[in-house]
Image (cartoon, rainbow, N blue to C red):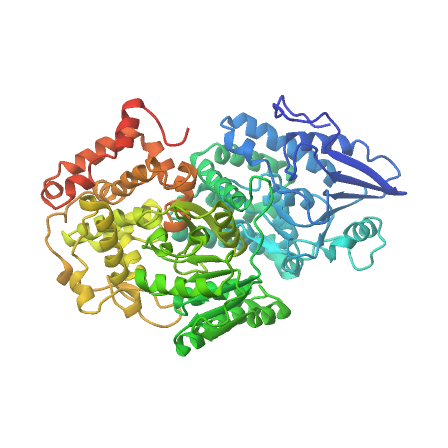
Amino acid sequence: MIDLGGLPLPENAPPPGTCVKIERPEAGLVVLRLEPPHREATVLDLPLVRDLDLALDQVGRGTRGLVVTGRAPTHFAYGADLDALESVTDRTVVERFVRAMHGVLRRIEGLSLRSVAAVGGPVPGGALELPLACDLIVAADHPSTRLGLPETQLGILPAWGGVHRLPRRIGVVRAMEAILKGRLYPARQALRLGIVDRLTPPEYLMRVAADVALGRDPSTRKGRRGRGLAGFFVDRNPLATALIAKKSRERVMEQSKGHYPAVLAVIPIIAAAPRTSMKAAEEKEVRAAAELATGPVAKSLIAIFRASEAAKKLAVGADGRKAPRFERAGVVGGGVMGGAIASLMAEKGIATRIADLSRAALDAALVEHAAEVAKKRRRRQLEPHEADAAIDRLDAVEGTIGLARAQIVLEAVAEKLEVKRAVFAALARELADDAVLATNTSSLSVDAIAAGLPHPERVVGVHFFNPVRKMPLVEIVRGARTSEDVVRRAAGLALHLGKTPVVVKDVAGFLVNRLLGPYLDEALRLFGEGFSPARLDALLEGFGMPMGPLRLLDEVGFDIATHAAASLFAAYGERMTPSSVLEPAVREGRRGKKTGRGFYEHPKGRGAQPTLCTDLGTLRQGEGLATLSDEAALDRCLLPMLNEAARCFEEEVVMGPVELDLATVLGMGFAPFRGGLLRWADTLGAQAVVERIERIAAAGDVARRPGGAAKFTPAPLLARMAGEGRRFHG
């Protein structure tokens, strides 16, 4: 029996022996079924680890095969207990738990019989490390089956032997990619990589696993499938693995700027894994886990992950039932946004009709949809029959005829109130009274769009971000009369499309664009007054933003950015007074990436990289801020955004700080390792934030410019928090 080292059990822990059921369906076979009574979704918490250890005591002589499985063919386990991981701050507690789990897995690995893991559904992290300790893995061939080690995406590492066992199973090169990217592989791809040894339909999972465990399955050999002879020699060659580690580190540093310690810590461990004994492996993993799991980056990343998981409950009503899925949808507007939204709906199983007055726009949308589906088919992300069905599910119509049977219609037409009202008025005459009318507006009021319509309770904002397929956030904009049921159904649609919904109030700019406004405006002012554009973008990228603010303005488009800034100014007054830096560029048709030139030149061609323009002097307005310090420049960009976030928090634009942070990370790419805008503010402290804002307000250039004093006046909530020593979180 393993030593739990005095680790405290959770308050709801069931009695010993109740989390793992022991079954003996036939002579010589023992089945250990993970079925903790205190959790609806199985996770590898301390009670389950305790009971798995106890159950192994029952695997006695005469047993020829062992199967470890979950409560259902597509429900094995959902990884480690993140609740406990998020709250732990004591390194010794982490060390004791990691050692305990290593002890259990070593017992499985050391059994003198054939051990088989029968898995299905999500099998992430620790849920895969348990099967990796078995001789063979049989997986359910089902769309829900996903296997991988995503721990580095949470700021930790696969510390239960996975960082050593996966390289031994599939080779260093493949394991390096799998662990650094934290990918969860579909069942068939996991088979090709050698992560699993056998696939079977879910209904046959236990029968096949039993045959494999008892040696009755001739198609499964004990051994590793993923490396091949060449891979074996690479893995055993210290020079080869050192080169792999070096290249991996260079790539990670280029992508992450060193902000994510887990990916850097795991690289040398993976590289040396095939030449490391499991006893030495345990020591490496224990030390790394204790440091990483108690560090600030892991806490921030786990908080964001948990917030995104909590967002899935937005589609669930008070009665515990999920909002019904939409089967038929319409999209009005065949432009870039409308076409991408319609394409995604069709790919995800919704019969979709896209409508536009322009046949050319419709044809372009259909061609783009076909190209996207073909790309996924080539990459084996869609099976041939799935790709054919995705093509068949999207059709196009000129006008709005033929949308009458749609359960939801989303408009993505020109950002003009009268146009959107006219579209919805026409749709209201055609659609059933309970059909949802959704607007993808980014700047107009949902209530204003719904004004005068019958059944305004069915009008909701469903704000996608561009590019639709890549951006993970969808703002669900609740109008004053939008029903709770419609909000739930809209959130359910976002989740079905693979997005994360955040419910926001119907205010100008909603949440993300309202926060981006002062951030981008201040970046423009810094540039306009002589601050180096290359230095400015590099500073914000170094802080952790995915791209600098000037590069982001190129992506957004100068025309759209100036329109959004004007909308915010009209709504919020002088603190949103917009810079005039972009006006001459817009007049001359220079609009950013869409025209090929903005702050950067954007050459066409695959792999072509943007380069800073050499004629930016025409947009300059002075040189007064050329020598501003890096710290002061960061404060000028980030603190107005934080100040506005405090106003949004106080106005209850979102439900709370967790949701606001989630939106900033997923919607604007705010540094994930910092946990979001408000969590970052908590690390600074409200008093320090207020002092830094007031310091900027006292600067001569800020005091002189229109709206400068208002922009850099601490939000009332921030001022109160500073006086009371409070935090946004807890």
Task: Give whichever of 384, 465 is nearer the camera.
Answer: 465
Q: Residue most toward the right?
A: 27
Horizontal and vertical percent for residue 371? 49, 72
Residue 265 lies, with reference to residue 248, above or below; the image says above
Can residue 258 be seen here? The reply is: no
Horizontal and vertical percent for residue 379? 56, 66
Image quadrant where one finds the C terminus: top left
> Residue shown at 62%/51% (left/top)?
147
Occupied quadrant, residue 332:
bottom left
Left or right of 335? Residue 515 is left
Labels in figure, total: 0
Residue 113 lies, with reference to residue 452, above or below; the image says above
Horizontal and vertical percent for residue 209? 79, 50
Can residue 449 be seen here? The reply is: yes
Image quadrant where one finds the N terminus: top right
Horizontal and vertical percent for residue 382? 59, 65
> Residue shown at 28%/69% (left/top)?
595
Left or right of 219? Residue 520 is left
Left or right of 666? Residue 35 is right
Task: Give whichever of 47, 264 is nearer the camera.
Answer: 47
Occupied quadrant, residue 5:
top right
Residue 226 lies, with reference to residue 604, above or below; the image says above
Task: Give whichever of 373, 673 is nearer the camera.
Answer: 373
> Residue shown at 43%/52% (left/top)?
474
> Residue shown at 32%/47% (left/top)?
507
